[in-house]
Image (cartoon, grey):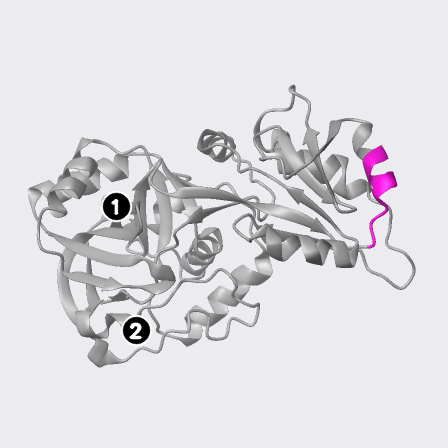
Amino acid sequence: MTDVRLFPARLVRQDWARRTVTAMSDSQDESGVDLYQVAVDPAAYQDSPVALYVYRQTRGDATYTGIVCDVAVQAIADGRVRGHEAVHQLRVDALIWHHARTDGPPALVSLLHHAGPEFRRAVAGAQQTEPVLDFAGPGGFQQTLWRLDDSPATRALADEVAAAELYIADGHHRVAAALEEWRLADKPPGAGLLCVVHPMDGLSLSSFHRWVSGPVDVVRLLELLDREFDVLEVAEQPAPSVGSMGLYAGSHWYEIRLPATRPAGAAGLDVTILQSHVLDRLDPAPPGRVRTIDTIPAATPLDELLPRCDFDRAALFTLAPPPAETLIEVADAGQVMPPKTTYFQPKPAAGIFLRR
């Protein structure tokens, strides 16, 4: 049995899509209650035959296209589907609890792979035909879907994707929950996980910044940084890049340049070096205050963050995402990055498919 499979599904109807399909959020709380916030109305879905799907999300000039397929959980257990981020066990447990009590739409997991000729041929050919679904979806993304019916060409596509190395882009917690559920069910051989597989450059990679709650003693912080890094005060926000991060503290911007020589793998990531050499060594908070380190998506507008930073006397470290090849290096080495190191966009919408 191949690791990447065609699957039967119930597909949301065109006239129901805008009111049924929602954004897939990563902010599930640990209770696991109403994680995807999708009310399942049977009338909203229709049976669809065994197939694969070309799934495209478009916003402005940006287009992201992948293949929706069923990936065997056994392939995850065998390490043929590899992750790069650590997971929080409480969130995994919450997902397992939720899945055991609800029968809502599955949230797609985003995977990356080195796309081959069958993949590129299928994606290009499908987009020359009439889609089975096309609607304005969450986040301003146009959601378009083409069905690849069961045929020798579709099965050749599935075999090609199955032969590639697959890397988790988004959905580490959902993958971990599926793996645990599979083990609890005595490892049924047919168990699968619905995924959308993109080429390596098929998604947008971004980072999380680090926010140090105030009050921060800026002089002491700069002294700590000066011990191991080159610190330069600059007139405006420096563009973060691999090996160079920004710092906003005391109403001033600084460029922090990390050493050029660093360990391989996860230990050499900018965020790991920042954590071990700086954040773990910060002075404790003053009496009556609690020092927290928060993660903030890099897409958050700075004009929202800087006034808050000044008011709280906080410090903000701005980081660039590691290159995609670094994620592969970490995954291939069996290592994991710190939580909230990177995130990929866009996330697949929730509620397009029901399992059948």
Which contiguous range is marked in magenta?
A: 215-223
Q: Position of residue 347 (x, y in %)?
A: 39, 54
Q: Secondary structure at mark 1?
A: strand
Q: What residue do we see at 36% from left, 68% from top? A: 22
Indicate the amino acid at tag 1: Val
User: Counting other residues with Cα less than 10 Å from the Cα at mark 2, is it few (<14), some (14-19), or many (20 or more)?
Assistant: many
Looking at the image, residue 263 lies above or below residue 336? above
Q: What residue do we see at 48% from left, 32% from top? A: 323
Label 1 and label 2: CA atoms lie apart by 27 Å
Q: Position of residue 256 (x, y in %)?
A: 70, 31
- Quadrant location of the C terminus? bottom left
Left or right of 47: which side holds 236? right
Q: What residue do we see at 52% from left, 35% from top? A: 334
The chief SS type of the magenta part is helix
- Of 240 and 103, nearer the camera is 240
Res 77 seen here: no
The mark closer to the camera, 1 or 2, is: 2
- Quadrant location of the N terminus? top left
Q: Which residue is mark 2?
A: 20
Looking at the image, residue 139 lies above or below residue 19? above
The quadrant where residue 317 appears: top right
Q: Position of residue 128 (x, y in %)?
A: 10, 46
Task: Tell me the number on the disc at residue 4.
Answer: 1
Q: What residue do we see at 70% from left, 58% from top? A: 308
- Of 112 and 298, nearer the camera is 298
User: Counting other residues with Cα less than 10 Å from the Cα at mark 1, is it few (<14), some (14-19), or many (20 or more)?
Assistant: many
Q: Position of residue 229 (x, y in %)?
A: 75, 27
Task: Tell me the number on the disc at residue 192.
Answer: none
Res 329 seen here: yes
The quadrant where residue 194 appears: bottom left
Mark earlier in primary sequence (1, 2):
1
